[in-house]
Image (spheres, helix red, strand yellow):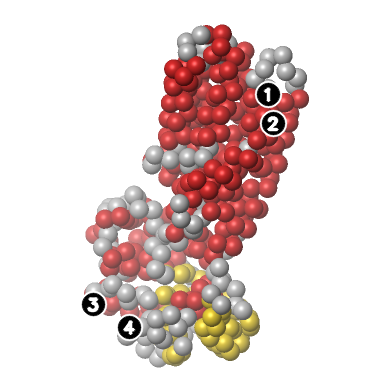
Amino acid sequence: MTLLRMEGVACIRGGRLLFEGMDLALGPGEAVLVSGQNGAGKSSLIRLAAGLLRPAAGQVERTADAALADEALALDQRLPLVRALGFWARLDGGDAGAGMAAMGLVHLADVPVHMLSTGQRKRASLARVAASGAKLWLLDEPANGLDSEGAECLAAAIAAHRAAGGAVLAASHQPLSLPGAREIAL
Amino acid sequence: MRALILRDLRLAFTGAGAALPVVFFLLVATLFPFAVGPDAALLARTGGGALWMAALLAALLPVERLVEPDRASGVLDQLAVRGVSEESIALAKLAAHWLSFGPPLMLAALPAAALMKLPQQVLARLELGLLAGTPGLAALSLMVAALTAGLRGTGALAGLLILPLAVPILIFGAGMIDPTGSEGAWKLLAAASLLLGGIAPFAAGAAIRAARD
């Protein structure tokens, strides 16, 4: 069973062809790491997979729930972290506490979101993904701003997700601990 | 859907969002008697129309916080990934926006009417008019907020877009205040509101989708 399939996908942004003929299939337990220079279309590929962009050509087919972590935090700034994450966890039917535990954020549960540092924000956005229970994780630059402990949390969360039959599509220009992942260079 | 409405309501009432139009409305009601003088008969005759103008302008104030913050912070994207349609998002936002705009304005109309020395009968018609008209104003604000999301300095542009479209609401709203007027104005006001409210989720939804590309 494939969770995400792309066939001959082309992406045009701002009148510029970023890539074409992109074929990709992601099954349970698999991971794909998209690499490339700034502006190569890594984020666009993630947004195509999330259904936020329409492909200029080809087909994107997703058969599973997806969870997206990108540059936008999408958490209410004034709320304590646990309640801000709780809003999405309730929509997803997930558990915000489990997500925060996975990303080492439990001690920050009562801190308002606007007080968090860059790395803590990144962890929070990954905690939402970890809490969602979605089969397919779409991670755009997940290691940006993370310290080494955060990177370890991320690697452990991804490993647990894949062991449970989930799949990961990650775009990163930094080294990412994804054992056995296929690489796509844009 | 319910979660979205509750979230928007919480944001409106914990921030300055819901209070701003009300304060503006009351401020106009306070200043108007200074401008035209303390003649009670003149105030009672013109006050209803002035309050409708104030309500119309108050509807402009929340435009910038309706859609743009959620677009910029990625909330709209996250909802789309979860398969929530843009139309349902817009409908939830419309409901939440009216709840944080219409009833508070109707409450504020009580002291405002006292400042304008409006007779009780006129006050009742004003309240009825606000009940019928504010959903239309809320729908207009939401549509324009969705259309201008992602643009810079939208305040003035929003005014230029909303005010001409709000002409029917102003005409019928101010028209039904006149105690000698016919019953038709109230029905036309409700019809204008219904039309705007019916279009808004689809127009705002399409605008939110278009802003993503």
Residue at 59% over, 23% down = B49
Q: Can residue A101 be seen in this view?
A: no
Residue at 60% over, 57% down = B207
The residue under label 3 is A148
Q: Earlier in the sequence, mark 1 or mark 2?
A: 1
Mark 1 falls within which chain? B
Mark 3 falls within which chain? A
Q: In which quarter of the image is the N terminus of chain A?
A: bottom right
Q: Nearer the viewer, mark 4 or mark 2?
A: 2
Q: Callout 3: 10 Å neighbours few (<14), some, many (20+)?
A: few
Q: What residue type is labelled 2?
A: Leu
Residue lying farthest front?
A: B36
Q: How far apart are marks 4 and 2 (CA)?
A: 59 Å
Q: How far apart are marks 3 and 1 (CA)?
A: 68 Å
Residue at 47% over, 34% down = B21
**Element assignment for label 1:** helix
Q: Which of marks 3 and 1 is in front?
A: 1
The residue under label 4 is A174
The residue under label 1 is B175
Q: Which amino acid does label 3 sit on?
A: Ser
Q: Where is residue A180 in the image (x, y as percent from the top left)?
A: 40, 91
- As drawn, B82 above or below A49: above
